[in-house]
Image (cartoon, rainbow, N blue to C red):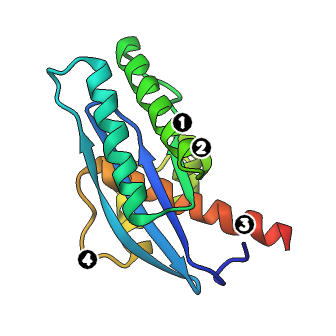
Amino acid sequence: MPAGKTNSIVLGIDPGIADTGYGLISQRQNQLTLLAYGSIKTKKGLELAKRLESLERELTKLIKVYRPTLLAVEQLFFCKNVKTALMVGQARGVILLVGEKNHLLIKEFTPLQVKQGITGYGQADKRQIQLMVKAILGLKEVPRPDDAADALAIAICGLNHQNFTSQLGS
């Protein structure tokens, strides 16, 4: 799809088991618009399967309301706590499955790719990324919570990737 000619909606996801950040942006005529952002929270006391089901249900609702065509997801690349890494990996599996079941194009980005794509610097800190998300989307404030700001950064990377690859194809 050529950049700027059609309306693209991207759902960016920063995966987690307790908090999964999401951000939805659209592009029309090279104008980015923030549609929604937030965090899907699961109850700590619930068993893992129930938490994953809750995540699946909430993501499906977002997809049905906003109808994105692209799902941009952060890859899990490193985690100090093995148990946490396994649970986040399971959350990622649910996220990818929801995207596939809803016929979305799925693109995955490493944290390094997101940092480079948003700030041009692979070692950018969280605050630099948040400020760039604010500037790129023309927001008055940095989006909160942090997971949501990260998800918006991932969505912007997804949209930029989509625009770049469509330009190569034309």
* Badge 4 or badge 2: first in the primary sequence: 2
Q: CA distance from mark 1 to mark 3?
A: 20 Å
Q: CA distance from mark 3 to mark 4?
A: 28 Å
Q: Which residue is mark 3?
A: 164
* Badge 1 or badge 2: first in the primary sequence: 1
Q: Secondary structure at mark 4?
A: loop
Which quarter of the figure is the N terminus placed in? bottom right
Q: Which residue is mark 1?
A: 75
* Badge 2 or badge 3: first in the primary sequence: 2
Mark 3 or 4, closer to the camera: 3
Tell me if 22 is positioned left or right of 158 in this view.
left
Q: Which residue is mark 2?
A: 108
Three-letter amino acid code at the position of disc 3: Phe
Q: Say if residue 128 shows up in the picture.
A: no
* Badge 1 or badge 4: first in the primary sequence: 1
Crowding around mark 2 (Cα neighbors within 10 Å: few <14, some 14 to 19, many 20+) is some
Mark 4 or 2, closer to the camera: 2
Q: Residue at x 48, y 41 (%)?
A: 98
Relative image position of residue 31 (x, y in whole percent):
51, 83
